[in-house]
Image: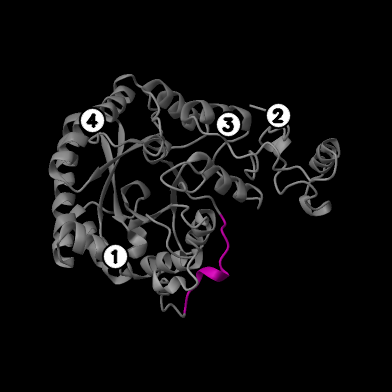
Amino acid sequence: MPMLADPSVKYTPYTPLDLPDRQWPARHIEQHPIWLSTDLRDGNQALARPMTATQKRTFFRHLVKCGFQEIEVGYPSASDTEFDFVRSLIDDGEIPEDVWMQVMTPARGELIRRTFDAIAGARKVIISLFNATAPCFRRVVFGKSKEEIIELATTHTRLVRAYVDKHSAQNGTKFRLIYGVEAFTQTEPEYVVEICTAVKNAWGLARSEWEERIMYNLPATVEIAPPNHYADQIEYFCTHMANRNEIIVSLHTHNDRGTAIAATELGLLAGADRVEGCLFGNGERSGNVDLITLALNLQTQGIPCGLDFSNMQETIGIYTRCTGLPVHPRHPYAGRIASSIPPAPRQDAEDAEDQITSHAKAEETGYPVAPLRVRSEVKRNMWQEV
């Protein structure tokens, strides 16, 4: 069957936001966001063969080595395997004192209880509570009105708060809440503000101190529009929520249209504070945003990225062995041939990088090979197999 001559008979374009005073196009990223790795949850659940407990622990240790201080370790109510892995990290003392573990739970009472059983005794925990909010989900999946979905969210937020109070008193655990607006990009912007305000009020613990702020995960659950539209949606949220200094805005983009990197960078310009993603863009369908590319993009602009990928060979090796997935040979910073310049001989390309590495600033020589000195910065030999 040939492609549709008129795709509009099947597909509907996105509806742009009326945001005439948008500010994000004139901004510059000046610092790195808070990074959250979801390799062990979103990334792992997307694998044809999920990681074993041993592989997940190896991956976890490497994420810590790379400098991640927030790591989503699983979805403990989903299965005994997930539950047991989360418990093993706690019981075996694997989680450093400066690392927050994040666990995911839908807004369902029995699954929230199971989640708190999994994290009992942990030092620092981020509870990721979520429910879908888009019209299609409200109508088809839940059969509920806007008001009923708000009641669903606030009821379960109060339940989470009750468990938080209990476990804090019993075990001294420090908790933070991130509320996930599933299908955010397909939800009415004003309704997102309404439901998030209601959740914040139900939580009742949001303060201006950084670790006491409530977090909101605003995902492109399915990427359905160009990056500038996502930025508009993020800016609308940031400028319409009251008490912005009590909120952390988190991005979670997927790559269905191939623009997750751009959407995330524009989302940061629009006011977001935090990014969730996976190494090398692993994740559902076309993948999550690639945290390595995002971080090293910042590095090439002279902005410390807050993560350490100085041993890219090791990162590639652990990733490929644990996930069973390859790293694309033209990955911007880790690809085996990404920094080559055909038809120049490979040695000429490497010599050119060695030459510019000796200079203090890139503008003295330009970028004859790549925007990042991959051999010196991330120890990646463009022709070396892993």
Mark 1 neighbour class, 10 Å CA radius: few under 14, some 14 to 19, many 20 or more: many
Gap between marks 1 and 2, in whole Å? Answer: 48 Å
In what element is the residue under mark 1?
Answer: helix
Q: Nearer the viewer, mark 4 or mark 2?
A: 2
The magenta segment is 21-30
Q: Position of residue 49 (x, y in %)?
A: 40, 30
Q: In percent of the image, x 47 and y 48: which residue is there? A: 286
Gap between marks 4 and 2, in whole Å? Answer: 42 Å
- Look at label 1 and name its amino acid: Val
The reply, left or right, for residue 257 in relation to residue 77 is: right
Gap between marks 1 and 3, in whole Å? Answer: 38 Å
Q: Nearer the viewer, mark 1 or mark 3?
A: 3
- Look at label 2 and name its amino acid: Gln
Q: In percent of the image, x 60 and y 50: which residue is there? A: 298
Q: Earlier in the sequence, mark 1 or mark 2?
A: 1
Q: Earlier in the sequence, mark 4 or mark 2?
A: 4
